[in-house]
Image (cartoon, rainbow, N blue to C red):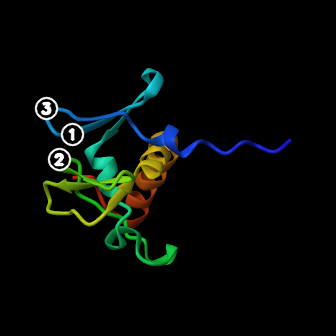
Amino acid sequence: MQEKEADPAALWPIEVHLSSDKRVLSLHYEGGQVRALEAEYLRVESPSAEVRGHHPSERKTVSGKRNVTMVALEPVGHYAIRIRFSDGHDTGLYAWSYLAELADEHEAHWQAYLEALADKGLTRD
């Protein structure tokens, strides 16, 4: 039996909220589901070429972002948002599908990030 692909519209939140301390982005979906993503996590997992490069071998491990905040959210069409961070980074477009992936795979992404920091002698501070 073949797995059914997720409906792309199901990945689009009906509301997007930034916490008052600008450290947590909350995505609210039909049916009441809420996904919360921290600023540091979003910053180090930026989809920008600056972080991801143009090839997996070019990916950078971003350190020192424990205290980064989100200073602005800008819609990009109906498919994404641009997040402006307190460190000046603003080049990644976060598609709704990518934000859903980051939420669904948070533990694996975060553990890989912590291991990459340790391997390179870097810190979150």
The residue that label 3 is drawn on is 20
When the figure is inspected, residue 119 is found, relative to residue 104, above or below; the finding is below
Q: Is residue 61 left or right of residue 56?
A: left
x then y, percent, for residue 121: 34, 63
The residue that label 1 is drawn on is 23
The residue that label 2 is drawn on is 69
x then y, percent, for residue 98: 45, 52
Picture mark count? 3
Residue visible at 36% across and 73% down in the picture: 49
Give the camera-side residue of 23 and 29. Answer: 29
> Can the viewer see residue 118?
yes
Residue visible at 13% across and 54% down in the picture: 86
* CA gap, disc 3 and disc 1: 8 Å
Label 1 Cα crowd, 10 Å radius (few <14 / some 14-19 / many 20+): many
x then y, percent, for residue 105: 52, 44
Give the camera-side residue of 69 and 90. Answer: 90
